[in-house]
Each structure stands twice: as structure tokens, then as C-alpha cells.
Amino acid sequence: MKNEYVKANHLAKHIHLFNHEISGVDYASFGELRGNICRISEKQNIHNETAQSGFEVINTIYNFNKNLELYQLLIDKNGFEESILFFDSLKAPQIKQIRKSFNNKVSSQTEVFYTDYLEFKTIEEHTYYNGEISKWVNPNQGDTKYHFKENGSVYKFRIRNNRDEQSKTTIIYNSDFQILESKTYSQKNKTELLYEAVFSYVDNVLFKIVYIRHKPSKSLVASTYEFLFEYDKKGLLISFKDNFVKKTWNYDKNENPVLIKETPHNDSSIFETSMKYKYDKYNNWIYKEIKLSRNQLKISEKKIFREIEYFHNQKKT
């Protein structure tokens, strides 16, 4: 969260208020960026040992303004192209425009209109091959409400009314959009606590989450789950464990992970993700090789090539 690109694009707010990543944006990549970047051109060569196609090429271009804010994303997957344009940038998008093409011929254009809390209000889609124009209004807009306190804390209220659950959830954030607690009550019996989660921090860093399910659901039994996080002296995550799995991270001198090991508690399998990098003079990686293996047997391999352009006529690769 200390990275300037994370701050410039309000990623904590996006993740928590929007609930998930906005189409095509890999939030994890923001935390490792350095310098005043104008454009990142990225090519991924993916080889999957188990997939039928086996090989895939993805070309992606990230365009930033001088305030470090992402304003456009261009994705090309084997001739299928997608252009995502954020009006007012990713920091506070009011409108997201998605234009889809195949072999340079536009097939559709969609515009998503957002509220100030990053929930969409309406979607308008224009399909070019038949000239059809459709408009979709979010029917659940009233299901999520926010309350911003004067001290900077945020309360989020979420109502669910579906066949599996009828509940109301209250989530409390601090001024840095860190979750402090989440409690979900029954809609039928408003005093009945279904499940809750408490988030604990030390020096503003998350170290434990305790999740308690008081009432079983169709897929989960009543139980308590603990999620534990451990960091090194630089604040890098080096260990995570819960009731089911343990994960560990090793890093290089540029603080990028070079080995991630995952060990399920009830399985003898060991999953490993290894990474190799090449860097430019600004310590941004311009080549990344990723190998995923299970019990030392390779499952997939990905090679990513980057060309990074900087403002002030800087271009180092």
C-alpha cells in the first residue's frame, strides 16, 4: 500500500468498495512499479501442459498519465482485441468504455457508468453486427449502502436476498480502507449472528483474521477459522497459513517473489511457483519467467516480455 502507483489509483478503495478487480486490471502488478511510467507494453507466452491448446499469446498495453493513474488498457488474445478506457482514469472512474474487436474490426462497445462508490449504475451496450443497443440498470443498487464517518472510517452495509441466504452484513473500515470487522446477521431474526470476521493489525500491518461461522450453511459447517500472516523486516509477506494450507514466499533484492511454496495440510502434494526476472535501470522488470509445478513436475510455464516507456523521453528496456 506504500507504493505510489497503488496510492495514485486508489487501489484499496477499489478493492473494498467495488468488491473485485475491475475488468482486466491486475492490481498485484501496481505494487512493484517504479519511476514515472508512460506506457507498459507486455507480451505473455503461456504454455500449459494440461490444456488442449497448450500455448497462448496475450499482448497487453497499460497507458498511464503523468499523475501515475492508469487511464487505458489494451488487450489482444489471438486476434480478439479489447480496449478498456477509464474516463477520469482508474483513480475515480465515472465511466468505463469497453470496445471489443476481432482482426481490427469493432464488434461491440459497452459503457459502464459508476457511482462515487464504484458500484455501477447502468450499462449501455452497442452491438455493431446487428445494430442492437441495449441498456441494463443495476436492480440491486439499494442492496449496498455506505456511510462515511467524520473520522475517516467507512461503514458498508450489504443485504443479500437469494435462495441460499437472507442476511445483512456490516463491514467497518478504517481511514486507510483496512477492514476492521465484518458481521452478518439473519434477515429473519435480526439478532441472530450468522458469521463474523475480525481483522487484527500490528503497526498498521495485517497479521491475523479470525472467521467464525455460527450457523452452518449448505456448503459450510459451523466452525472457527484462523488466517495468519508473517512478514520480514522489510514488511514483505513471507508466510500465510489457515486451517487448510500453508504458503511461503522468497524474494530477490528488488523485493519481487522468486519462489512461492504451497503445502496443503491434508495432502502430500507441494505446489511451487518459481520466478526469474530481468530488470531495467529503474528496477522495473522487463522479463519474467514463471513456472508452476506440483511435486517438482512442471504444470505450466509463462514468459512475459515488457517494454517500458517513461515520461521525460526516458525509455529503458
Image (tube, rainbow, N blue to C red):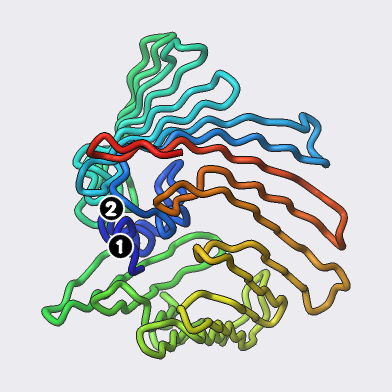
| Residue contact at pointers 1 and 2, CB within 8 angstroms | yes
For residue 115, say whether it is visible.
yes
User: What amino acid is labelled 1 in the image?
Assistant: Lys
Expressed as whole percent of the image width and height from the top left, the position of residue 24 reads: 46, 41
For marks 1 and 2 on the same chain, the one whose residue lies earlier in the sequence: 1
Decide: few, some or many residues near mark 2? Use Cα within 10 Å; few <14, some 14-19, many ≥20. many
For residue 143, say whether it is visible.
no
Q: Residue at x 31, y 70 (%)?
A: 157
Query: Is residue 109 rendered to the left or right of residue 230?
Result: left
Q: Is residue 31 above or below residue 193?
A: above
**Among the 4 quarters of the image, the one containing residue 9:** bottom left
Q: Residue at x 39, y 51 (%)?
A: 282
Q: Which residue is mark 2?
A: 118
Nearest the viewer among 177 and 58 is: 58
Q: Residue at x 59, y 40 (%)?
A: 304
Nearest the viewer among 43 and 22 is: 43
Q: Is residue 158 above or below residue 68?
A: below
Expressed as whole percent of the image width and height from the top left, the position of residue 215 reads: 58, 83
Q: Which residue is mark 1?
A: 13
Expressed as whole percent of the image width and height from the top left, the position of residue 212 reads: 55, 86
Expressed as whole percent of the image width and height from the top left, the position of residue 295 reads: 87, 63
